[in-house]
């Protein structure tokens, strides 16, 4: 599926950013539309399922439909193609990005805000270590 992508350079290791993207407990910290999330199993991997709670109070099922450890994952939410999550290492830093289906072009603004929040969280985690 062709997607529109948005990127941000982040002054933190790719592993830190990847952790933020795959730890469902941290999604509300950086996801402007996410109030909470639960994973059905123990592992965030291809085929993983769970529930994401939106800020509108709606709980929706999700499934991870593409997964490359440490690099990218894509999901379906309520059975519909949704956001692609990307991390590209760059030395001690990385680039993080989101891809959205063309039909969801308006969601890129939300993704822009999410990337700023991810940067703040990742840099904060690194500084506290």
Image (cartoon, rainbow, N blue to C red):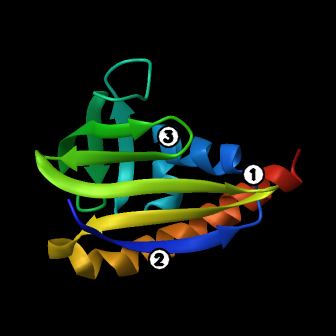
* Whether residue 47 is situated above or below residue 68 in the rendered picture: above
Residue behind mark 2: 112
Horizontal and vertical percent position of residue 99: 36, 65
Nearest to the eye among marks 2 and 1: give it: 1
Q: Residue at x 75, y 51 (%)?
A: 13
Which residue bears the numbered disc 1? 13
User: What x and y, as percent, mark residue 93?
Assistant: 76, 60
User: Where on the picture, by quarter, is residue 107?
Assistant: bottom left
Q: Dot 2: what SS?
A: helix
Quick one: label 1, few (<14), some, or many (20+) residues within 10 Å?
many
Q: Nearer the viewer, residue 65 or 49?
A: 65
Comparing 56 with 80, the one in front is: 80
Residue 62: image location, x then y, percent: 23, 40
Q: Point out the tag, 2 or 1, that comes first from the N-terminus.
A: 1
Residue that carries the numbered disc 3 in the rendered image: 22
**Inter-mark Cα distance, 3 to 2:** 18 Å
CA–CA distance in space, label 1 to label 3: 15 Å
| Residue 72 x %, y % | 46, 47
View extreme (left): residue: 79
């Amino acid at each position: 599926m062709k997607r529109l992508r948005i990127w941000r350079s982040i002054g933190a290791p790719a592993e830190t950013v990847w952790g933020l993207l795959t730890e469902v407990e941290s999604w509300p910290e950086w996801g402007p539309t996410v109030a909470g999330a639960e994973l059905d199993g123990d592992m965030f991997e291809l085929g993983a399922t769970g529930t994401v709670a939106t800020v509108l109070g709606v709980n929706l099922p999700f499934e991870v439909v593409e997964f490359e450890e440490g690099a990218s994952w894509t999901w379906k939410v309520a059975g519909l193609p949704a956001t692609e999550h990307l991390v590209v290492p760059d030395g001690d830093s990385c680039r993080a990005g989101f891809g959205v289906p063309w039909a969801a072009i308006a969601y890129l603004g939300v993704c822009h805000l999410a990337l700023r929040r991810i940067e703040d969280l990742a840099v904060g985690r690194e500084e506290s270590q």
